[in-house]
């Protein structure tokens, strides 16, 4: 079994879900007392969020790249960044590590394509929905037709992520907002919805949509286990 390196804490609310799912999936594959071989570097998300908001992405790339290098030196053989938004600096991480980084957008695209879908709705932070590192990658590298919510809904979803879910707060009113966004994307032709924020699964699940939901956190963890076990 390979050792999985996790760059987490963005937020720790979702990182703890990664830890649980990785261990559950290894146990399901191997049985008995098996668990995942993991090393975790958990950042202070207060500092990360400030740099995001202030558009200090080069600095973020250097900081998170250093975390990846620390994990590699600690024995990690593959690397997960436990946040969709922080894949904006995936290239900066790959420049300094020699182990493979499992890109969460590619994992999501593979699942969408395997399900026979082409037009997909995307929910996440404003960075993830609006910038090329995620939505653009789905379009350019995987040929998907990506739909995102209207501007006011993108702003509201961004607020829900940072002021509620990243603080461990789940509100029924916000759940209803997400359900409405899913319905509206579906009405516009989305054949499925990518939950492109690792906290969104805390709020909605398959029962909240008439089309498939592709939870990037779960898909990311599943792919990491497959790679760790050489499936």
Image (tube, helix red, strand yellow):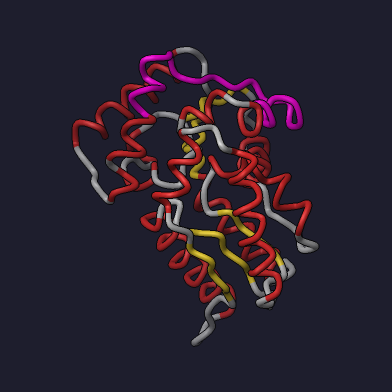
The quarter of the image holding the N terminus is bottom right
Would you identify the image quadrant in which residue 184 lies? top left
Reply above or below: 7 against 163.
below
Task: Tell me if residue 95 is in the magenta stretch.
Answer: no
Question: Of 67 and 179, which appears nearest the observer?
Answer: 67
Question: Of 183 and 181, which appears nearest the observer?
Answer: 181
Would you identify the image quadrant in which residue 75 lies? bottom right
Task: Tell me if residue 144 is in the magenta stretch.
Answer: yes
Kindly identify the residue that appears in the image at 56 percent across and 26 percent down: 120
Question: Of 211 and 14, which appears nearest the observer?
Answer: 14
Range shown magenta:
136-157
Task: State whether the magenta stretch is mostly helix, strand or loop.
Answer: helix
Kindly identify the residue that appears in the image at 80 percent across and 62 percent down: 98
Query: Could you tell whether 123 is left or right of 4 in the image?
Result: left
Question: Of 6 and 97, which appears nearest the observer?
Answer: 97
Residue 174 spot, x, y in % from top left: 25, 32
The quarter of the image holding the C terminus is bottom right
């Amino acid at each position: 079994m390979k050792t999985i390196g996790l760059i987490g804490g963005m937020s720790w609310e979702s990182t703890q879900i990664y830890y649980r799912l990785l261990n559950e999936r290894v146990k399901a594959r191997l049985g008995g007392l098996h668990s995942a071989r993991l090393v975790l570097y958990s950042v202070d998300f207060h500092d990360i969020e400030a740099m995001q908001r202030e558009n200090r992405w080069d600095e973020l790339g250097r900081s998170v790249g250093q975390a990846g290098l620390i994990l590699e030196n600690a024995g990690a053989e593959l690397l997960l960044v436990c946040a969709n938004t922080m894949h904006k600096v995936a290239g900066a991480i790959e420049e300094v590590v020699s182990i493979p980084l499992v890109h969460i957008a590619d994992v999501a695209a593979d699942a969408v394509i395997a399900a026979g879908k082409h037009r997909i709705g995307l929910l996440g932070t404003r960075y993830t929905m609006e910038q090329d590192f995620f939505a653009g990658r789905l379009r350019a590298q995987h040929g998907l037709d990506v739909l995102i919510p209207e501007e006011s809904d993108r702003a509201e979803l961004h607020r829900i992520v940072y002021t509620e879910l990243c603080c461990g707060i789940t509100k029924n009113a916000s759940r209803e907002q997400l359900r409405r966004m899913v319905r509206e994307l579906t009405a516009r032709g989305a054949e499925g919805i990518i939950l492109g924020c690792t906290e969104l699964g805390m709020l909605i699940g398959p029962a909240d949509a008439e089309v498939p939901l592709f939870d990037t956190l779960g898909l990311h963890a599943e792919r990491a286990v497959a790679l760790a076990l050489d499936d």
